[in-house]
Amino acid sequence: MKIETSIQISMSSPNIISGDGILDDAQKLSWLIANLAQSHQLQPSIPNVKNFRCSVVPYPARHCDVLMTPSRILSNLFWQSLPSEAISNELKRLRLRLMDCGCGKGIYFPIIDDSLGGVESYTGVDIKARPGWSDFQKDPRVNFVRRGAEEIDHSLLEDKTLIVSQSALEHFPCDLTFFQNVADALRSRDYPTLQIHLLPTGTMWRQYGPHGFRGYVPANLATILDMFKDFSRSHVFTLGGKHCLDVHYRYVHDTLNPEMPDRRRTHRDEYARATKAAIEADMASEQIDIMDACFLALVIHSHPQREIF
C-alpha cells in the first residue's frame, strides 16, 4: 500500500497501468477507463497555447517518411522548425549542451543537431541500452547513459542547457518525479535553460489504444508547469488537430473501430495526399484547443533573458 501511494504522488495522472506490456482484457479496460476519465475531467486554463505552423510542409521528405503517422510527421516538422538563431543567442554563453530524456535509439540527435546548426554535446538517457548507440558514439560529442527517468538527477543535469524528450513522457511511470528533479536542478541556476518535450494528448487512448501510462491534458500539464512558474516562461504548441486525427483514425488505427486494418501501405499514395492536406488544413486553423490536438509540444524556458518562442 505504501508503494502504491508513493507512485500515485509522483505521477501526473492516477493511472498506474502501463500500456507498453502485454495486458489482459481486464487491464486493457482499466487502462482505457483511466485515460477516458482523465480526458473528461474539468480542465484548467493553460496560458500561452499556440498552434504550430511552418511555412512549408516538407512531406514526404528526409525526416518525414511517407508512412509515418501524422503525429510523428508533425513532431519532426516541429524539431526542424526550431528557432535556431534565437536559441543560440539565448544559450550562446553556455553553448548547446543537449540532453535527450527517454532517447531510445538516439534518432533525434541528428535531427536536432542539424536543426540547431550543431550542438556542443549530446547525452542520451534511457532505461535500457539500445541497438545503434555504438554507431552514434563514434561522434565524440555523443554519450549515452542507462538510467530511469526518475534517476535523472543534478549530476546529469549539471551543465545541460537544452533538455528534450520525444514521445517519452507517457512512458515515464513517475513523470512528476522527473520534472521535480529537473525543477530542483534549474531553480538554483542563474542562467537560461530550455526544455522542449513532445508528448501525446488526452485523445491518445483512441489513436493508439493502450500505450504508455497517459496522454497529457491541461490538468496534468498545469501540475508540471506549476513546478517552474516562479523562474520560467512556458508555451504549449498544439501539433495538428481534427483533420490530422481524422486521417489517423481512417488510415492508421481507431480504438473505437478495432477491426479496421492499418491501411497506410495498401493506400500509400492516398494516405500521403490525405496526410499532407490534413497537416496544411490544421496549420491554417486560427487556434486548436489542447483537448482537440493531435500531439503537443511543451516548452519551458527557465531564467529567460530573451524571447525565443
Image (cartoon, rainbow, N blue to C red):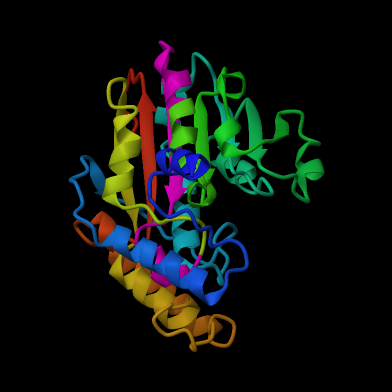
Residue 291 locus on image (x, y percent): 27, 59
In magenta stretch: residue 207: yes
Q: Quadrant of the C terminus?
A: top left
- Position of residue 203 relative to residue 239, above or below, is below
- Position of residue 213 relative to residue 152, above or below, is below
Q: Quadrant of residue 47?
A: top left
Residue closest to the eye, 69 or 104: 104
Q: Quadrant of residue 183?
A: top left
Q: Residue at x 41, y 82 (%)?
A: 250
- Position of residue 61 relative to residue 161, above or below, is below
Image side of residue 178 versus residue 203, left or right: right
| Picture mark count | 0
In this view of the protein, can residue 72 be seen by the observer? Answer: yes
Residue closest to the eye, 265 or 178: 178
Residue closest to the eye, 174 or 302: 174
Image side of residue 32 versus residue 126, left or right: left
Which residue is farthest front? 1
- Position of residue 154 relative to residue 23, above or below, is above
Residue 99 locus on image (x, y percent): 58, 32
Image side of residue 309 versus residue 142, left or right: left
Residue 228 locus on image (x, y percent): 34, 27
In magenta stretch: residue 14: no
Image side of residue 78 versus residue 94, left or right: left
Residue 211 locus on image (x, y percent): 51, 63
Q: Residue at x 35, y 37 (%)?
A: 224
The magenta span reads: 182-210
In this view of the protein, can residue 118 be seen by the observer? Answer: no
